[in-house]
Amino acid sequence: MTQAQPAILDALPPLARYLEFNLAAPADPTATLRRLAPQVDGRRLVLGIGAPLVAMLGREVPGLRVPAAAAGPGIEVPATPAALWCWLRGDDRGDLFHAARAVQAALGDAFVLERCVDAFRYRGGLDLSGYEDGTENPSGDDAVAAAVLAGAGAGLDGSSFVAVQQWRHDFGLLDAMAPAQQDAAIGRRRSDNVELDDAPESAHVKRTAQESFDPEAFVLRRSMPWADAHGSGLYFVAFGRSFDAFEAQLHRMVGAEDGIVDALFHFTRPITGAYYWCPPLRDGRIDLRALGL
């Protein structure tokens, strides 16, 4: 799938920096996006466009929307929509710093930085809790089918939709749980990543079993741990050909279907939530035809 931004399907990098921007008012983003476009190669820099920016341009991307806050028994999942998302990937923190500076310089005064999160790969792909993240990720052609839009027309084919959430872990609560309780909350043993035969219905793997939905709810996860002076957790990233699969999983997690809340919420909560459309590439450059650019 040469049209997709390649990093969507590639393995995770050692390091990442995520930038989320909102529009400055008043500002015309057209010239700014044209100035940013040459930096977006889809490998070192993945670009996502939010619904507020598409609306400002007077355009429509079918399937792109602003996320709605979700709630369940004792659970609230926030919606924090933004205009622009940049996923910077690399193996040197200094290089990521300078790449982020270049993005901000290109955006100038037209956009305001709302969030900047530095992330990293932990022990080959573990969450900071020690459990493997994305065990059930599709691969190969299945990953393309789950994450990349097809049959939508020029300027849309090869694009992806991405749901982004920053989750903050409470390690005090996690450490207070016995190892068996922790495994039951995830539904897998931390020691060998084997799924528990007797996992409770609240186990995360049961709440999000992608093949158990009708229709099946497959997403391609590209999440990475984060940690700073204010907390730590997982920067959750899920690519899809639409937001439907992600929303189906989220609604089940908060107990909207049956009142059973995902046990993951015992020790972690999302503090942000946003949706973006990741344009395809055309001749190696970001393709913004759908936005009239």
Image: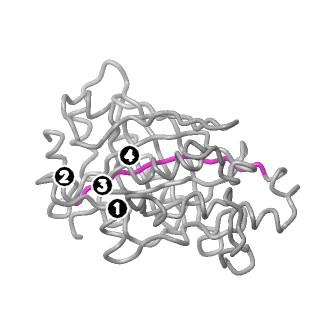
Chain part drawn in magenta: 158-170
Label 4 – label 3 distance at C-alpha: 9 Å
> SS of the residue at dot 2?
loop
* Front disc: 2 or 4: 2
* Front disc: 4 or 3: 3
**Residue matched to label 2:** 156
> Residue 82 location in percent, x, y?
42, 35
CB under 8 Å between callouts 3 and 2? no
Answer few, some or many: residues within 10 Å of disc 2's Cα (few below 14, many 20 plus, some between 14 and 19). many
> Residue 49 location in percent, x, y?
32, 42
Residue that protrudes farthest toward the front in the picture: 258
Residue 168 lies in the magenta stretch: yes
Label 3 – label 2 distance at C-alpha: 17 Å
**Residue matched to label 3:** 40
Quarter of the figure with residue 225 = bottom right
Query: Foreground residue, 103 or 164?
Result: 164
Residue ID at (62%, 35%): 76
Label 1 – label 3 distance at C-alpha: 19 Å
Identify which amino acid the numbered label 1 is placed on: Ala
Label 2 – label 1 distance at C-alpha: 13 Å
* Front disc: 4 or 1: 1
Identify which amino acid the numbered label 3 is placed on: Val
* Front disc: 3 or 2: 2
Earlier along the polypeptide chain: callout 3 or callout 2?
3
Q: Which mark is residue 147?
A: 1
Earlier along the polypeptide chain: callout 2 or callout 1?
1
Residue ID at (15%, 59%): 151
> Residue 191 location in percent, x, y?
75, 78
